[in-house]
Amino acid sequence: MAKAEVQEPNLSFGAFSKRAQTLAVRFGAAIGLKTGELAFAPEISSTLATITLAGRASETITRNRGKPHRVVPIASLNHEVWIWTGYRENWLKQGSEQNFRFVDAGFTLHIGRIGELSKPQFLRSEWVGRRSRAFVELAGHPHWQLDILESARASPPPPIRFGGPVEQQAILEFAAGGAVEPSELLLGLTVENMHLASAALWWQSSGAKVAHVPVSVEELDRWILGCITYLRQEANRCKIAT
């Protein structure tokens, strides 16, 4: 008996390009942007296909990891500070395959002012498929990851009014003796390494899995649009504490 083909989202060259256009319209509508203000920029080679955000409403910023990318505003915190989102997805074609197959997709959330290159990253929402090198059976997929402390550690220390300059502190080794202040413990904690599952149905079955993969483009798109709608909803709850 022939081995059943694994179900996974797949797209032809032409379908990938068309999807980048149609998804941009739906994505923009979900976050309140007019047609044309948001676009997806596809990059397609013989084996790899990627889409990232673009369009008039987007800005290029630096990232914690990887190359700079473009983000769009989704919620205003005051007259000058916004919460922004970035989005990227990757597809792969291997061997004799005719279509690109889904690898991974992810959102990042940032806070910052319009026109500024630095907009610190504080949250990610990601979905990886089995073709991703990041796929692990026991990690939650899709999942959330918190980047706020990583961004804080990467930020330059505040200047001291008197005395010499402050040196950048490395990640703390908690086993090394000596008293450590609670604030230093918090800042040193690498919570960005945690995969916070967003589809773990433990209350339904004691053997429920946390690693789920999309099986179709339609399923992937429902996650994308549902996730960005929810991110915008929750971003609008945020305020800047004074």
Image (cartoon, rainbow, N blue to C red):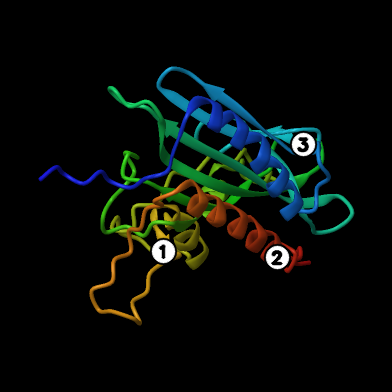
Does residue 95 appear in this view?
Answer: yes
Residue type at numbered disc 1: Ala
> Residue under circle 3?
116
Instruction: Kindly give the residue lying farthest to the right in the view shown.
Output: 79
Does residue 123 appear in this view?
Answer: no
Q: Which circle's residue, 3 or 2, is located before the other in the chain? A: 3
Query: Left or right: 183 with respect to 83?
Result: left
Residue 177 at what x, y percent from top left? 30, 59
Q: Which circle's residue, 1 or 3, is located before the other in the chain? A: 3
> Residue under circle 1?
197
Residue 190 at what x, y percent from top left? 42, 54
Q: Nearer the viewer, residue 207 or 180?
A: 207
Residue type at numbered disc 2: Gln
Residue 124 at what x, y percent from top left? 53, 52
Q: Looking at the image, how many numbered discs can be counted on the residues?
A: 3
In which quarter of the view is residue 94 placed? top left
Question: Disc 1 on helix, strand or loop?
Answer: strand
Labelled disc at residue 233: 2
Mark 3 Cα within 10 Å, few/some/many (few <14, many 20+)? Answer: few
Question: Disc 2 on helix, strand or loop?
Answer: helix
Question: Disc 3 on helix, strand or loop?
Answer: loop
Residue type at numbered disc 3: Glu
Q: Is residue 13 above or below residue 149?
A: above
Q: Real-space Cα distance between discs 1 and 3? A: 32 Å
Mark 1 Cα within 10 Å, few/some/many (few <14, many 20+)? Answer: some
What residue appears at the point 44 percent right and 33 percent down from the top-left corner? 91
Q: Which circle's residue, 2 or 1, is located before the other in the chain? A: 1
